[in-house]
C-alpha cells in the first residue's frame, strides 16, 4: 500500500474526525503523568522536516498543514493488560503532512508501549519513517499495519455487538450440499 493510499483510507474511513490539526509540537498526551509517566511524543523535527519539501515544522503548523491521527491516549491505559497475554499491541501516533496537491502524506509513525519497569517510567516509543527499499521499507509497512489495526479496532461498525466471542471453526464449513452456489462457485471448494 502506498503512503498516499494509506492516508486516503484514513480520510475515507468511518472515523475521519479523529484526524485533527496538529497545534503543538511535539504532541503531548492528556493522560495523567502520575499514573502513566510522561507520554510526550518522541517524534522530533528532525524526523519530519526532510520529507516536508523545505517547510519547517513551525511553518507547517502555522499554515495548518500538519495533522495527527492520535490513538495513543485511547489505548495506552490498556496496553499493559493486553501485552500480558499472547496478543501484543502498541499505542500509535501518525503525523500527516498536507501536500501542495491537496493530499495527505504520512511523515512518521510512533509506536509506544509501557516501560517494562512500570507505568511511572517514560514509555518506550519508537519512531518509524517512510522508506521505499530494504528492511526499512518492510518495517514502515509493519508500522502502517499497526496503525490500521488500531484504527479498525476503534471502528464501531466492525465490533461484535455482543462482546468478545470465540467463534468455532465449524462455522467455516459449507452449509449446503455439494453443488453450485447462487454465484456459480462450487460449494465443495468455497469456505
Image (cartoon, rainbow, N blue to C red):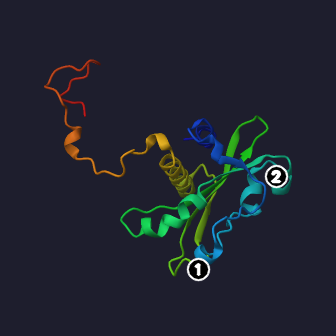
Look at the image and tell me in which quarter the C terminus lies.
Answer: top left
Q: Residue at the left extreme?
A: 177
Dividing the picture into quadrants, the one containing residue 136 is bottom right
Q: Helix, strand or loop at disc 1?
A: loop
Along the line of sight, the residue nearer the viewer: 181 or 120? 120
Along the line of sight, the residue nearer the viewer: 162 or 96? 162
Q: Residue at x 59, y 68 (%)?
A: 125
Q: Is residue 8 above or below residue 85?
A: above
Structural crowding at the residue carrying mark 2, measured as other residues with C-alpha within 10 Å and reported as few (<14), some (14–19) or many (≥20):
some
Q: Position of residue 114 (x, y in %)?
A: 53, 72
Q: Position of residue 80 (x, y in %)?
A: 47, 70
Q: Disc 2 to disc 1, how far (Cα)?
A: 31 Å
Q: Position of residue 185 (x, y in %)?
A: 25, 22
Q: Residue at x 53, y 60 (%)?
A: 75
Q: Earlier in the sequence, mark 2 or mark 1?
A: 2
Q: Helix, strand or loop at disc 2?
A: helix
Look at the image and tell me in which quarter the N terminus lies.
Answer: top right
Q: Mark 1 highlights which residue?
A: 120
Q: Is residue 185 above or below residue 80?
A: above
Q: Residue at x 49, y 66 (%)?
A: 79
The disc label shown at residue 61, or none: 2
The answer to whether one can see residue 1 in this image is yes
Amino acid at each position: 500500500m502506498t503512503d498516499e493510499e494509506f492516508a486516503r483510507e484514513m480520510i475515507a474511513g468511518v472515523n475521519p474526525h479523529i484526524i485533527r490539526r496538529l497545534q503543538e509540537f511535539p504532541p503531548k498526551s492528556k493522560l495523567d503523568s502520575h499514573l502513566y509517566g510522561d507520554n510526550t511524543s518522541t517524534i522530533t523535527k528532525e524526523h519530519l522536516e526532510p520529507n516536508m519539501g523545505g517547510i519547517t515544522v513551525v511553518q507547517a503548523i502555522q499554515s495548518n498543514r500538519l495533522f495527527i491521527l492520535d490513538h495513543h491516549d485511547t489505548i495506552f491505559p490498556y496496553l499493559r493488560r493486553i501485552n500480558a497475554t499472547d496478543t501484543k499491541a502498541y499505542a500509535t501516533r501518525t503525523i500527516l503532512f498536507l501536500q501542495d496537491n491537496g493530499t495527505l502524506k504520512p511523515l512518521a509513525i510512533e509506536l509506544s508501549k509501557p516501560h517494562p519497569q512500570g507505568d511511572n517510567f517514560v514509555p518506550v516509543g519508537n519512531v518509524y519513517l517512510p522508506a521505499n527499499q530494504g528492511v526499512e521499507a518492510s518495517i514502515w509497512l509493519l508500522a502502517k499495519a499497526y496503525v490500521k489495526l488500531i484504527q479498525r479496532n476503534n471502528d464501531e461498525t466492525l465490533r461484535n455487538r455482543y462482546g468478545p466471542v470465540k467463534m468455532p471453526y465449524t462455522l467455516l464449513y459449507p452449509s449446503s450440499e455439494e453443488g453450485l452456489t447462487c454465484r456459480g462457485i462450487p460449494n465443495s471448494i468455497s469456505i
